[in-house]
Image (cartoon, grey):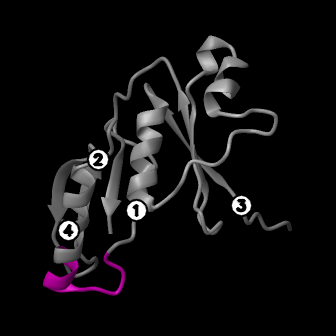
Amino acid sequence: MTSIKQFQVTFDCAEPRPVARFWCEALGYVVPPPPEGFTTWDDYDDSLSPEHRGAGVCVDPSGVGPRLFFQRVPEGKVVKNRVHLDVRVGTGLVGEERVAALEAECERLLAFGAKRVRLLVADTDYESCLLMEDVEGNEFCLD
């Protein structure tokens, strides 16, 4: 059986580029160079049909994390995500130290347009995590 080592996570968006900028900030990702044959992403957009223009892309500069792709869709978000990202900022931390790390990252991301939803306090099975939303309301956790 073949093992897949690379994958892309795709977000449906009303405005892909602001969502892409948010996730670049959240994850330390960067916008890659435009496709071969194009000087800028705007040049690339001009080559596409109007309904496909404005997509956003983020990549991990170390090449380890998955590529993120943000595509424009006509319909708005109406229900909870079935899949979400966990941003691992509290790995190895417990108790108050973990919550402090989650809160600090929450404050940083609020400046980029994120919304705090609620802190889920540790119980007998799980450590604390902080539920948030990106600039278009896509849920994610600080974990």
- Say which residue label 4 marks: 104
Number of other residues with Cα within 10 Å of mark 1, as a class: few under 14, some 14 to 19, many 20 or more: some
Give the Cα distance between marks 1 and 4.
16 Å
Which numbered circle lies on residue 6? 3
Q: Above or below — where is 126 with respect to 30? A: below
Residue type pointed to by label 2: Phe
Q: Residue at x 23, y 86 (%)?
A: 94
Which label's residue is closer to the chain start, 3 or 1?
3
| Residue 117 visible, this angle | yes
| C-alpha gap between disc 3 and disc 1 | 18 Å
Q: Position of residue 140 (x, y in %)?
A: 35, 53
Say which label, 2 or 1, has the lower sequence index. 1
Q: CA distance from mark 2 to mark 1?
A: 17 Å
Looking at the image, residue 21 lies above or below residue 87 = above
Image location of residue 48, percent across then percent down? 70, 19
Q: Which residue is mark 1?
A: 86
Residue type, numbered disc 1: Asp
Q: Residues within 10 Å of mark 2 (few under 14, many from 20)?
A: some
Cα separation, mark 3 vs mark 2, equals 28 Å
Name the residue tied to disc 2: 112
**Quadrant housing the N terminus:** bottom right
Q: Report, in whole angstroms, how far the alpha carbon at label 2 lies from the one at label 4.
A: 14 Å
